[in-house]
Every structure is written in C-alpha cells, then in structure tokens.
Amino acid sequence: GLAPYALKLVVQPLRTPPVLHFSTPLGDSQTIRYRIRSYLRKPCTYTVALAADDFLADGATVAAPAAEDSSGVEVAVDVTFEPTKLGASSAQLKVSNAEAGEYLCDLHGEGLPPKPQGPIAIKAGATAIIPFRNVFPTSLDFTMRCEPASIFSVAKEKETINNKKGTQITVSYKPLADTDPTDMGKLTVGSSMASWTYYLQGEPAS
C-alpha cells in the first residue's frame, strides 16, 4: 500500500566556512572575488557585512537575480586586502538575506614587508615627485633619507602623515661637477612600523 510521510526540512549553514587567503606587501593591495550560489526563485538583495581595518568589501549590498532552477545563480563579492601591519590579519565576511540565507567566509591575510620600487629617473638639476601614503591606522612620523646625500636630497627630511593619508616627496638630483651625470641612489622612507625603499636613477639633463 501507500505510506505517506510528512517531511520537515531545515537548511543549515556550512559547518566550516570557506577561507580566502591573501598575501601582499605593505602599501599594496590584493583583491579576490568571493562567490556564492543564490537559490531563491525571485530577485533579492544580499547584505554584505565586513568589519575590519585590513579588509574591504566592494559595496554594502549585492543584487541577485531569480534562480531559474535548483542549480541557483552565482553572486560575487570582491574583497580587497590592504594590510595595515606586518604579519597575520583575519576577519569574517557575511553575505546574508532574510529569505535566501546566510553565507560566511573566513579571511586570512599576511602583510609582507614593503617591496622596493623604481628606479625613478631624475634629470640632472631637476626634481622628481614620489607619491607616498601612510597605510597605518594611526598618524606617524616618517623620515626621508637619500643616499648618496652628496647628489640626491629631499625637500623635507621629516613629516607627520595622518592615517590613510598621502603626501608627495620631492627628490632633487645634482651631480658632482667632475663626474658623469649618471648616478644611482636610493630614497628610504621610514617610520617606527616599517620602511620603504625607492631606487633613484640620475640622468643627464639633455
């Protein structure tokens, strides 16, 4: 005969959230796309929640079209890691909708030492403007030092830069009169947290 059963189904989140791994030097950023499947049979909007200094989600909400079948539709959220310290950082991303459910993702980031940049070309007797940004969450004192100091120099040797704000560093190149005006040097921008190196390339005036 026929034996009917009443089914009570409960949808639960994943026991272990997926993990996104990031790794980038201080001063740089890395973006990875987090993807979920939305199964709601009507259009909806997901809320994106992420509270962290080092991680940023691209927008507070993300729209999802209606799912046409049981395979669902893909919904993507871009997550950017911009380290504010050396070493490990972690956070959790939550993408949720009251009807469609909640999706969690663990974020693990590794802040690496700043990578050297350049060489930056400077004409003899001229200057170069180097943009610099304080990536740390607090205001800091930065020192600027050129080597060799006999031919490369900076307009300001010390500056206090507010958190997440930028400045412009002016570097001058004046070759010695008795040498060929093609020299190599470097600019070091340092704080109590980390230091950045910019290689300099002196070039003839014409």
Image: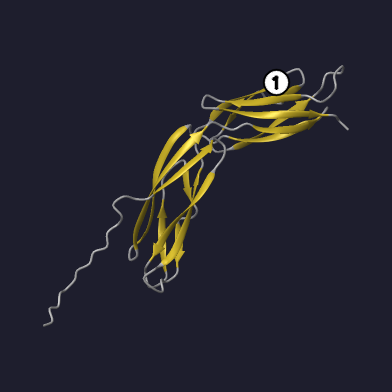
Amino acid marked by disc 1:
Glu
Query: Residue 124, how many percent across, how many down?
Result: 83, 28
Asked which quadrant contains residue 99, the reply is bottom left
Can residue 13 be seen in the rendering of this structure?
yes
In the rendered image of this protein, does residue 175 appear above or below residue 75?
Answer: above
> Hey, which residue is sitting farthest left in the picture?
1
Quadrant of image for the N terminus = bottom left
Using residue 37 as the reference point, say whether residue 26 is left or right of it. Answer: right
Q: Residue at x 28, y 52 (%)?
A: 15
Q: Residue at x 52, y 39 (%)?
A: 24
Would you name the residue on which mark 1 appears? Answer: 147
Asked which quadrant contains residue 157, the reply is top right
Using residue 49 as the reference point, say whether residue 184 is left or right of it. Answer: right
In the rendered image of this protein, does residue 42 appear above or below residue 128?
Answer: below
Q: Residue at x 15, y 74 (%)?
A: 5
| Front in this rendered view, residue 36 or 1 | 1
> Hey, which residue is sitting farthest bottom in the picture?
1
Colouring method of the image: secondary structure
Query: Residue 42, how many percent across, how many down?
Result: 39, 72
| Front in this rendered view, residue 85 or 166 | 85
In the rendered image of this protein, does residue 40 appear above or below residue 125?
Answer: below
Binning the other alpha carbons within 10 Å of mark 1 as few (below 14), some (14 to 19) or many (20 upward) gives some
Query: Residue 144, how many percent across, how many down?
Result: 64, 24
Can residue 137 be seen in the rendering of this structure?
no
Residue at disc 1, secondary structure: strand
Using residue 90 as the reference point, say whether residue 12 is left or right of it. Answer: left
Quadrant of image for the C terminus = top right
